[in-house]
Structure formats: structure tokens, C-alpha cells
Amino acid sequence: MKTIIAILIMIGMIVPVSALDFSAPEVIGEAQSVMPEEVPSFGEGLWYILKSAIKLVRPEFSEQCKVCLSVIAVVMVTSVLSNFQTKTASLVELAGVVGISVILLDDANTLIHIAASTVEELSSYGKLLLPVMTAALAAQGGGGSSAALYAGTAFFDSLLSTVIGSLLVPMVYVLLVMVVANGALVDNFLVRIRDFLKWLVTWSLKTVLYIFTGYVSITGVLAGGTDKVALKAAKLTISGAVPVVGGILSDASETILVGAGVVKNAVGIYGMMAVVATLITPFLRIGIMYGLLKCTMALISVFSGKKSVDLLQGFADAMGLLLGMTGAVSLLFMISIVCFLKGMSG
């Protein structure tokens, strides 16, 4: 009888065994239109995403150029009128400030909404991706590190998304109000408020990211080595390319470069490409407007007064803060994904 029971137990233990299959969740919305149909190497995938995103934003680039040309036209007209109507020069300059503000506020409002939506989309995708990455790392024996990394990323993502949506985005609107009001009134108090808001937004983004990178460093998942020449080049490029968080991104570039070396053999290839795909199109839209405003400001400074230049600088600062917000959330997930990949690669 005992023999029969033992045989039955052994038969019950004979179950099909298969390797765990982990796959990243698919992106939705506009990001899906720039993702490659087949997942190639990481570098080829990024190049495909960039080319697809450029095609998408090309029509909007033309529209943004028209907006900046309209600003230049307004400044030229007001400059000519100010020279011929010296008695009413202040009123003409005020009319120019109002005209520029009307032209730029509509596009600025659209881009603010795009930035806020991008932060929400990145956060939503991260909530789907992180459990998959956590399970994949835990399946390879990294249960402790995967749990710590998941908890930290989920917490800081929630914190950063809430701060951006509830506090920083409204601050950008207030900043633009201060910019327009200062253009009309030229009040030092308004300038101080504007500068304070800009500092507060920047400080908030940097603080959350510094604490997050400190957390993952303490948990032991951020350490790694890469080629020093490549690291230095990446830091110099990134630091000046991304407003607000460029310095933080350059400090974390070693982690990103190390991740690029292991991503080809890990589940995170699609996840990293999905984060880039979600970010790239809005980032280009805002970045193009940021660059065009800077160019327009340089052009009008030749024949315009200080009010118009300061006004454009204020709008450019607002675009820079939007780039910082979207870049901060994407950076948080990129660092997290790379840490997962390094854990999986051993």
C-alpha cells in the first residue's frame, strides 16, 4: 500500500516545466506609431523611433516657424512706429507686448497640456512595465533587489508625477502670467516672483531625482563601469542639451551607457524603447519651440527694446521647464530599467 501511495505522489509531481516568458507591455496612443514593428537592436530601434518622430512633428515645425515669424513682424512694426511716434512710444511698446503675448500664449498652453499628458502616459506605462521587470529579475534570483527597486521607483514615480501635475504645471501658468505682466509693467517685484517660480520648479525636479538616484545607489543597483571616454562625451553632450535636468542626466549617463551594453540580451529592450517612444514626440515639439524662441530672441535683440526680449526669454524659460518635467520622469524610468537589466545580467 505504501508503495502505491509513493508511486501516486511521484506521478503527481511530474508536471510540465517551461521557461518563464516575460514580455514588456505594448505602448498605446501616439507612441505606438513611432515604434518599430519588429524589435531590432537597441541602437537601430532608437534610430527608427527618432526618424518616425521627426516625420510626425515636421508639419508642426512649420506652424511654429510661422508663429515666430509673426512675433518678429510685430516687433518690427512696433519698433518702426516707436521711432516715428516718440510721444506714444510707450503705448506702442505696450501694444507690441500684448500682441506677442497673444501670439505665443495659445501655443504655450497647448505645449503645457502636451507635457502634462506625457508625464501621465509615462507614469501609466511605468505602472505596467515595472511589475514585469520585477518578476523577471526575481525569477533570476534577485528577489531582494527587485523588490527594493520596484518599491523605490513606484514611490518616486508617484511622487514626481503628483508634484508635476498638481504643483509644477500650475506654476508654469503663473510664471507666464508674471512674464506677461512684467512685460507690460516692468516691475522688479514681478521679476523676483518669476525668478522664484523658475527656481522652485527646477529645485523640485532636481531634488526628487537626486533623492531617487541616491536611493538606488544605496540599494547597490546603480554601481557599474563603462568606457571613460564614452562616459565623458555623454556627460558633456547631455548636460547642455536638456534644460533643468541635463546635469542630473549627465551624472547618470554612466548607468545609461552600462545599460546599453546589456539591453540587447534582456527583457527591457522593448521597455526602454517604449519610454523613448512615449517621450520623443512631445519632447521634440516642446524642444523645437524652445529653440525657435531662443533664435527669435537673438534676432529681435538687434532692433527691439528690452521688453520684447525679456518677454521671449520668459516664454523660452517656460518651455525649458516643460522639457525638464518630461525629461525628469523619463530619466527616472530609464535609470530604473537599466538597474533591472544590470541585475538580470549578473
Image: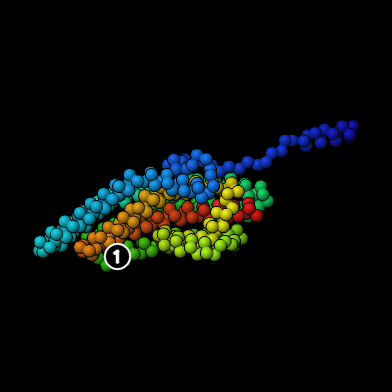
Q: Quadrant of the C terminus?
A: bottom right
**Residue to which mark 1 is pinned:** 191
List x then y, in percent, for residue 290: 34, 56
**Residue at the bottom extreme?**
188
With 236 as the anchor, is 223 left or right in this view? right
List x then y, in percent, for residue 113: 36, 48
- What residue do we see at 30% from left, 49% from top? 64
- Which scheme is used to colour this image of the protein? rainbow
With 306 as the anchor, is 236 left or right in this view? right
SS at circle 1:
helix
Number of other residues with Cα within 10 Å of mark 1, as a class: few under 14, some 14 to 19, many 20 or more: some
- What residue do we see at 41% from left, 59% from top? 241
List x then y, in percent, for residue 212: 52, 59
Whether residue 120 is visible, yes or no, is no
- What residue do we see at 51% from left, 52% from top? 333
Q: Amino acid at mark 1?
A: Val
Q: Quadrant of residue 189?
A: bottom left
Q: Quadrant of the N terminus?
A: top right
Whether residue 81 is visible, yes or no, is yes
- What residue do we see at 13% from left, 61% from top? 82
Q: Nearer the viewer, residue 338 or 220?
A: 338
With 107 as the anchor, is 5 left or right in this view? right
- The number of numbered badges drawn on the structure is 1
